[in-house]
Image (spheres, grey):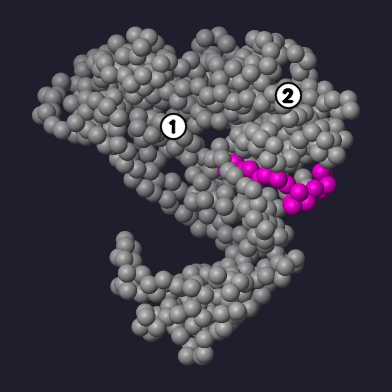
Amino acid sequence: MVEVLSAPLEVGFDYTRSLGPALSRFMTALRERRIEGVRGSDGRVYVPPVEYDPATAEPLTEPVEVSAEGTVLSWSWMPEPLPGQPLDRPFAWALIRLDGADTAMLHAVDAGTPERMRSGMRVRARWAAEPVGHIRDIVCFEPAGGSASPPTPAAEPAEPVTMVTTPIHLSYRHSASPGESRYLRGLADGRLLGGGRCPACGKVYIPPRGACPADGVPTAEEVELPDVGTVTTFCIVNVPFLGQRIKPPYVAAYVLLDGADIPFLHLVLGCPVDEVRMGMRVTAVWRPREEWGTTMQNIDHFKPTGEPDAPFESYAQHL
Amino acid sequence: MTDIAVVGFAQAPNVRRASGTTNGVEMLVPLFRRVLADTGLSKHDIGFWCSGSSDYLAGRAFSFVAAVDAIGAFPPVNESHVEMDAAWAMYEAWAKILTGEVETALVYGFGKSSAGQLRRVLALQLDPYVVAPLWPDSVSIAAIQARLGIEAGRWSERAMAEVAAHSRAAATANGLAQLAGPADGRVDVDDLLAAPYLADPLRAHDCAPITDGAAAVVLASGSRARELCERPAWITGLEHRVDSANLGARDLAASPSAAAAAAAAVGAARIDGVEAAELHAPFTHQEILLRGELAALGLGDEVRVNESGGVLAGNPMFAAGLACVGNAARQVMDGRAGRVLGHATSGPALQQNLVCVLEGRDQ
């Protein structure tokens, strides 16, 4: 059993979402430190609002302003808050029915200890210092009673909120397969370990695959491949993009190593872009040995060998 | 209507942390081999492949495409995928066979929950405008649901612990279980209740464990099913329903969608003749809630529920619901039951539910 390589993987994206009319009014009101629901066909007031009536599916258009104070219907205790949650100290999650609303909203209650929580308790919204038109303009709720925070002047009338941005960040531990782990360790030694040759069809994959995608059987035999191969197909990159390492134009090509049955994508540099062609023979240009790691980036790029082109038939099955 | 049966079922061991990748290939290759060997089929005999998995769980895009490597999809196969529990992939496969286009289908689901933070990942299935931006985690939402039922007198922390004790005792006979009680099967409810809260009012035993795993089911129609399996588990009803995504606008202490799916699946006013049920309840109170909904339709106390230990003994996300249906079907295929009910859930607080009723028939 090979010990597999693994590494942290952080995935993040700022989701921007356009709003329908009901949610647009809701978010616009939040920016003014007000809470607005919408009335459904059954007369119920939905907070947060819904765009369409749950019973008739008609668009809902009658806004109803409700209180920023309400009643806890049920709750749970969060002793160790997770990243992204409203508070970074222990708090309660609660379903809160605001005065004037018929449905409950889910939010955090800054109660300090679970002993201060009970269903039926009164809570009120704590507003962000600078609301922007987002559900997180309500920082959390807090037990009502005592003196309310001083009322804040409504914001100057401005354009309605029509878009919300929500950053999403997730953390993973990404594991390579046993074959990929051997391959990555091989790269750290300057070797190209392909394989898992398929016991059924004899094809050699690089990077290795756990199962032959054609036969569905585990691939076992390891095959060391040379760092020389053939360009099967390529494109000339003319468009700049975020994170680009090289100034366009440059060539991204599929390189089929000699003895392999699947090409991989890499860079072909070292000649004018208009000289790169299908069938061109290329060899790896490795980075200085002290920069090597368990990564394909050890090969900086491929460059032409100057050999005669490979005949089309030699790679026709690998396009 | 075309008769369709479950003719094969296999499940990977439920484990806290699998060594493989998040594309499931390492778990799926042996699973496919077993389920094909059991039915005497080769991959070329499968008319349709359908899977359930999640890119958010895998932390990579199109993870289900990498999983297709496990099939050996050459020549190209007839294949589809749902970003849901594979029980819903089974629904698609069942509908595909109903069209008459294919006679057999292999359905599979896989998930490596240990790769990420499951509680956070599941927050992303919530409303993306006003709920998900707060990152309410799956355990906290279930805990709010549990308290509603406790305070309404529908269940108690003790009754919830009894569900966990039953699961762990039953799971001692399930070699694939991740959590099982001591070998003598005796789990002390008072010991369970002495544990601290994980998310008041839920304790660790109230929550299904974080599990890596996979499951596969083979479906076949009519005479083909009888060729492949001595005692096929014939699907007499397969339905799914969904409740509002608006958590604060529905009664979380009830599951109208589970009741509606069950009523439609039995095709009658009452559930009749069911001897065993596998209910997909990732939290103890949800098993009580589901039993209540099904009892109202006539599911009696004598029905054996979650003899496999259920998902409290191992909950491989995106495969667990299919495994519940598969474990129910196996009771028919093994001759242990004549009529069974399999259930799968998806979404927060039992939002979406699927019910499959299966039965054995004398040839």
Mark 2 or mark 1: name the one nearer the start of the chain. 1
Q: Quadrant of the C terminus of chain A?
A: bottom right
Q: Which residue is mark 1?
A: B126
The residue at 30%/17% (across/down) is A38
Mark 1 lies on a secondary structure that is: loop
Looking at the picture, tell me which residue is in the foreground, A110 or A247: A247
When the figure is inspected, residue A42 is found, relative to residue B220, above or below; the finding is above
Q: Nearer the viewer, residue A69 or B126?
A: B126
Q: Nearer the viewer, mark 2 or mark 1?
A: 2
Quadrant location of residue A34? top left
Image-based side of A120 in relation to B18, left or right: left
> Helix or strand or loop: what does disc 2 sit on?
strand
Mark 1 crowd level (few <14, some 14–19, many ≥20, 10 Å Cα):
many
Q: Is residue B102 above or below residue A150?
A: below
Which corner quadrant of the image does residue B182 belong to? top right
Residue drawn where x is 49% and y is 51% of the image: B61
Q: Which residues are magenta?
A: B37-53
B40 inside magenta stretch? yes
Of A210 and B83, nearer the camera is B83
Q: What residue is drawn where x is 40% and y is 80%?
A: A269
Badge 1: chain ID: B
Q: Position of residue B12 (x, y in %)?
A: 71, 44
Q: Residue furthest right?
A: B363
| Residue type highlighted by circle 1 | Leu
Corner quadrant of residue B255: top right
Q: Which residue position holds label 2?
A: B236
- The residue at 27%/22% (across/down) is A125
Q: Quadrant of the N terminus of chain A?
A: bottom right
- Could you say where residue A179 lies in the image, as x and y percent from the top left? 63, 64
Residue A316, percent across and down? 58, 74
Residue flagged by tag 2: what amino acid is it? Answer: Thr
Left or right, residue B108 beside residue A109: right
